[in-house]
């Protein structure tokens, strides 16, 4: 990790997100991998969680809806 890379704090909204604390990445809630903010495209507004990609988002939805 470079010294200028820090984790951002983000509020996830419908179709957009708001950076609360500036940083360069967020952590995927499923894979725990870093997602650069410039590449962040998938998240849950309801759970306020970022996802690495569409497949990861789908995996999380399936886990949540097993009940």
Image (cartoon, grey):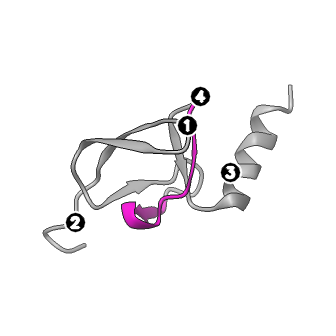
- Residue 55 is marked as none
Badge 4 density bin: few <14, some 14–19, many ≥20, Cα 10 Å? few
Image spot of residue 21 (x, y percent): 22, 42
The tag earlier along the polypeptide, 1 or 3, is 1
Badge 2 density bin: few <14, some 14–19, many ≥20, Cα 10 Å? few
Q: Residue furthest bottom?
A: 2
Residue marked by disc 1: 14
Rounded to the nearest angstrom, the CA distance separating label 2 from label 3 is: 24 Å
SS category of the residue bearing label 4: loop
Quadrant location, the C terminus: top right
Q: Which stretch is magenta?
A: 33-46
SS category of the residue bearing label 2: loop
Image spot of residue 48 (x, y percent): 50, 34
- Residue 5 is marked as 2
Residue marked by disc 3: 57
Rounded to the nearest angstrom, the CA distance separating label 2 from label 4 is: 27 Å
Q: Residue at x 75, y 41 (%)?
A: 61
Q: Residue at x 39, y 66 (%)?
A: 38
Rounded to the nearest angstrom, the CA distance separating label 2 from label 1 is: 26 Å
Q: Which image quarter: residue 53?
A: bottom right
- Point out the frontmost of discs 4 and 1: 1
Q: Residue at x 39, y 54 (%)?
A: 26
Q: Residue furthest top?
A: 67
Vertical position of residue 21 compared to residue 3: above or below: above
In front here: 23 or 1?
Answer: 23
Rounded to the nearest angstrom, the CA distance separating label 3 from label 4 is: 13 Å
Question: Does the segment drawn in magenta span residue 30?
Answer: no
């Amino acid at each position: 990790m470079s010294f200028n890379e820090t984790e951002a704090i983000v509020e996830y909204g419908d179709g957009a997100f708001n950076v609360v604390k500036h940083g360069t990445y967020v952590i995927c809630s499923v894979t725990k991998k870093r997602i650069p903010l410039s590449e962040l495209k998938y998240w849950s507004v309801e759970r306020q969680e970022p996802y690495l990609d569409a497949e990861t988002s789908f995996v999380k939805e399936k886990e949540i809806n097993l009940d």
